[in-house]
Amino acid sequence: MKLIIENCHSWLQTDNKDIKADLWKKLRFRDKNYFHNSMYKRKLWDGFKNFFDKDTGKFLTGLLPEVQAYLEHHNITPEITDCRNNVKWLYSKVDQDFLNKWVHVFNGNAPEEEQKKNFTLRDYQPELTNSVIENGRGIITAPTSAGKSAVMITLVKALPPTTPVLILSHRSNLSHTCYTEMGWWGVQNLGRLYNKFRDPNIVTVANWQSVHLIKNLLPKFRVLIVDEIHDMMSAGPKKIYAKMDSACVRVAVSATPFKDDGKDKVQKYSVKGFFGPILKIKSAGEGGVLTTKKLQDRNILSKDRCTFFPIRYPQLPYAIYGDAVTQGIAENWEFHKIVQRLCATLKGRTLILVERLAHGDYLQNLMPHALWVRGKDNLQTREEVIQKLKRSPDDTIAIATQGIFNAGINVFVHNLINAAGAKAAHQIIQRIGRGLRTADDKEILNYYDWIFEINDYLLDHSNRRVKILKDEGHEVIIKEIDF
């Protein structure tokens, strides 16, 4: 029996059909909502996604631990041929002072308000970096605002500057932020490929939608880093990962890498397949994974208070889900006026997240002084809003579609209003994470949400949000509207 390991895929070669059939059974899972698929309805597909080919023995290399654990359990020791072309790191280990080597470069490039006397990495940041250096791949999971971007910069700086690196995200604004910060730290041979920018280089920051412009170069990249991996597992990004057969270093980054708390097995094993397991570290304490509560206890993240208010009008007992969202949230004028009244009581910087454009338009009509940023706005407009949410000393209200601010945006808000609803754990965790960054003029994040008692679907989603936040260790208060 042979185990052939390559960067993207591996093969278990054996004549024992029972072993391959057993691995096939253990590594296949029902696709989410498979019963809606036309192929399933026509009985042309059984609804399963297979992560092990029972005929060829082929599987994604990130699932190597699962395959090896199975073989070990059955007392099977295969002959291993490792064909991975490992990267030679410039630094075999980094410490907390690693980036201080370039702090003078940072201060020469970054705006004055961003400059630092020194830059000491938090204990978990070099540990995560060293884990990648040692293992070559894995999932970096840490709460929003824990400083994952510093880990990504440290990884790139630990490589020889001639190492081809592709850093991917799902939105241009995330790519732009990453490119800007990499530039501040003096990353050499830095290029970008997103929005109007078409200048790739040895280290290329890109959104995945633009990668087709360099598709012939994909096999040349040695390192792949993917930001906000939970939003990067659709068919398009996965085709990119599969073509990068020279990328032996593969890193996925997210506060919530697995959707639905890992219950979506297809998404979970796809992430693990392309990138490997979650990297666990000693400095994270019990469980080896950083949590919001752990970082709040260390004052790395802001404390927070989550307040839910009931919405009881209009009653929509018979509305299907889409209509309930439209009539009960996006076009609910009574709800908009309640949000307006709440904002009138708030001090500091406030961010309101909405699901639909009409919702944002209504709120801006009620609050014409509020900043309103949506998908069609260019990078400059978004950056201006982000800067005001970072540093404005005046009371500031910004309204944004949730897709823009769900992940990867650095702001320092005092108040976060979730007017977009939602039920998925990764969405709620990402949203509240937008406000957990600490600031000199901030003691606590006030998070506001709603119990929609107007429709069974909306009520169920509201209750799920309450449970998710409580399970994450947040203080949750449910009270009547008192403003």
Image: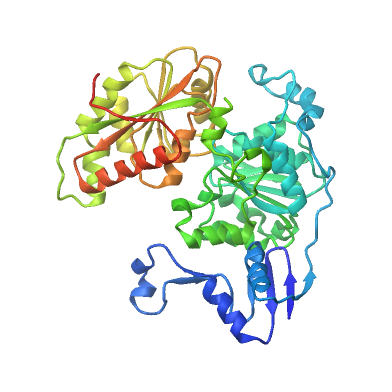
The colouring scheme, among rainbow, by chain, secondary structure or one colour, is rainbow
Q: Position of residue 403 (x, y in %)?
A: 44, 41
Task: Compare residues 429 and 355 and report the one nearer the observer.
Answer: 429
Q: Is residue 403 visible?
A: no
238 sits left or right of 404 in the view = right
Q: Position of residue 230 (x, y in %)?
A: 52, 50
Q: Position of residue 416 (x, y in %)?
A: 41, 28
Q: Quadrant of the C terminus?
A: top left
Q: Is residue 371 visible?
A: yes
Give the vertical position of 231 relative to 27 (above or below).
above
Task: Compare residues 471 and 425 and report the one nearer the observer.
Answer: 471
Residue at point 68%, 42% (across, down): 282
Q: Position of residue 102 (x, y in %)?
A: 79, 28
Give the vertical position of 298 relative to 425 (above or below).
above
442 sits left or right of 362 in the view = right
Give the farthest residue toward the top: 394
Residue at point 81%, 42% (across, down): 93
Residue at point 16%, 35% (across, down): 313
343 sits left or right of 480 in the view = right
